[in-house]
Image (tube, rainbow, N blue to C red):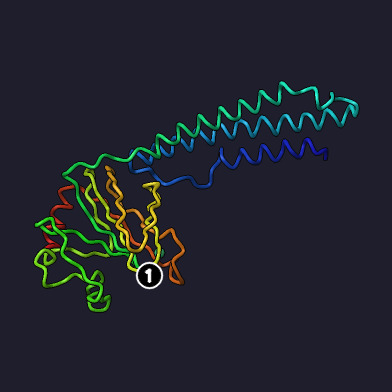
């Protein structure tokens, strides 16, 4: 089969993979996630259009050359075309980069009336801590950390602020409210990843890394560690449960008792 026809078949097969997708992204649950998806869609359409056009042009050139071996001009006679497509490609890349940076730079403006949750990653599990009714986190001490003793964060029992702190193994947040996650690691570098947020945030030992989110859609979403952190890395998962605000308040009040 002539090489030109093979190229056309490969192009059609490549397009078919996207036209009949076996799987696509999970739902986007924040305004920022929707923005990333829109940018991804634009990039895919533009890159796809250029890909198809270039492949068909290449196939046509090969097939034409096959029939009339002496067709074609000298390579040096296309300076204007070369400059033209180089400038067009540069303008296209810069425009896409500028459009994309709007999404990257946008972070939700978290109000003062936010729900603050501490996220603790360690080999190979997640813990989440909420302040109780006093809205203050209690002091923690490294020497008090005991997974088997039920104190995975080392909360100091002497500190009254920590007595109503709630520690959980899954992340519960209220829908429709601003949430500030404060990310911590107990040992090595981990990464907080929820596909539906379209966000991956590294968690570095010794640092407190803020991550602001606002989710309107209640549901249960997987939290995975996206940084290879040791032998049990693949088991390091939890869930982010987005609850109706009323149900969340009731759960928190009950858990703090
Ligand atoms: Cu990890």
Which of the two residues, 125 or 191, is positioned nearer the viewer here? Answer: 191
Q: Quadrant of residue 45?
A: top right
Q: Quadrant of residue 49?
A: top right
Q: Dot 1 lies on which element? A: loop
Image quarter where the N terminus lies is top right
Looking at this view, name the residue that lies furthest to the front: 206
The response on whether ligand 1 sits within 8 Å of label 1 is: yes
Which of the two residues, 1 or 95, is positioned nearer the viewer here? Answer: 95
How far across and down, in percent of the image, does residue 207 sit?
A: 32, 59
- Measuring 24% from the left and 48% from the top, which residue is drawn there? 179
Ligand 1 is found in which quarter of the picture? bottom left
How far across and down, in percent of the image, does residue 27 sit?
A: 39, 44
Which of the two residues, 70 or 135, is positioned nearer the viewer here? Answer: 135
- Describe residue 28's horizontal placement relative to residue 92 as left or right: left
Q: Which residue is mark 1?
A: 123
Q: Sort mark 1 into few (<14), some (14-19) or many (20+) by Cα contacts within 10 Å.
A: some
- Describe residue 65's horizontal placement relative to residue 196 as left or right: right
How far across and down, in percent of the image, does residue 228 sit?
A: 46, 63
Q: Is residue 85 above or below residue 220?
A: above
How far across and down, in percent of the image, does residue 95 sit?
A: 50, 29
Total count of labels: 1
Q: Is residue 229 above or below residue 9?
A: below
- Measuring 31% from the left and 54% from the top, which residue is drawn there? 209
- Measuring 24% from the left and 42% from the top, which residue is drawn there? 110
Image quarter where the C terminus lies is bottom left
- Measuring 65% from the left and 33% from the top, which residue is drawn there? 52
């Amino acid at each position: 089969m002539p090489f030109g026809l093979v190229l056309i078949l490969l192009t059609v097969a490549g397009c078919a993979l996207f036209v009949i997708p076996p799987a696509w992204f999970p739902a986007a649950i924040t305004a920022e996630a929707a923005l990333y998806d829109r940018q991804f869609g634009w990039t895919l359409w533009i890159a796809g259009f250029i890909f198809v056009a270039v492949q068909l042009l290449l196939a046509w050139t090969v097939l034409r050359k096959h029939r009339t071996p002496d067709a074609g001009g000298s390579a040096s006679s296309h300076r204007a075309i070369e400059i033209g497509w180089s400038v067009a490609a540069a303008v296209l890349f810069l425009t896409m980069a500028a459009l994309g940076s709007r999404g990257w730079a946008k972070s939700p403006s978290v109000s003062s009336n936010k729900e603050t949750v501490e996220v603790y990653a360690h080999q190979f599990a997640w813990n989440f801590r909420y302040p109780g009714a006093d809205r203050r986190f209690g002091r923690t001490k490294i020497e008090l950390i005991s997974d088997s003793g039920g104190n995975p964060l080392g909360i100091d029992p002497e500190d009254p602020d920590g007595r109503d702190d709630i520690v959980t193994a899954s992340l519960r947040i209220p829908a429709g409210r601003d949430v500030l996650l404060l990310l911590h690691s107990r040992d090595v570098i981990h990464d907080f990843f929820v596909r539906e947020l379209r966000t991956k945030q590294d968690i570095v030992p010794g640092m407190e890394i803020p991550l602001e989110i606002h989710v309107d859609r209640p549901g249960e979403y997987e939290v995975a560690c996206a940084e290879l952190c040791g032998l049990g890395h693949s088991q390091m998962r939890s869930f982010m449960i987005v609850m109706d605000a009323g149900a969340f308040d009731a759960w928190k009040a009950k858990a703090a008792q």
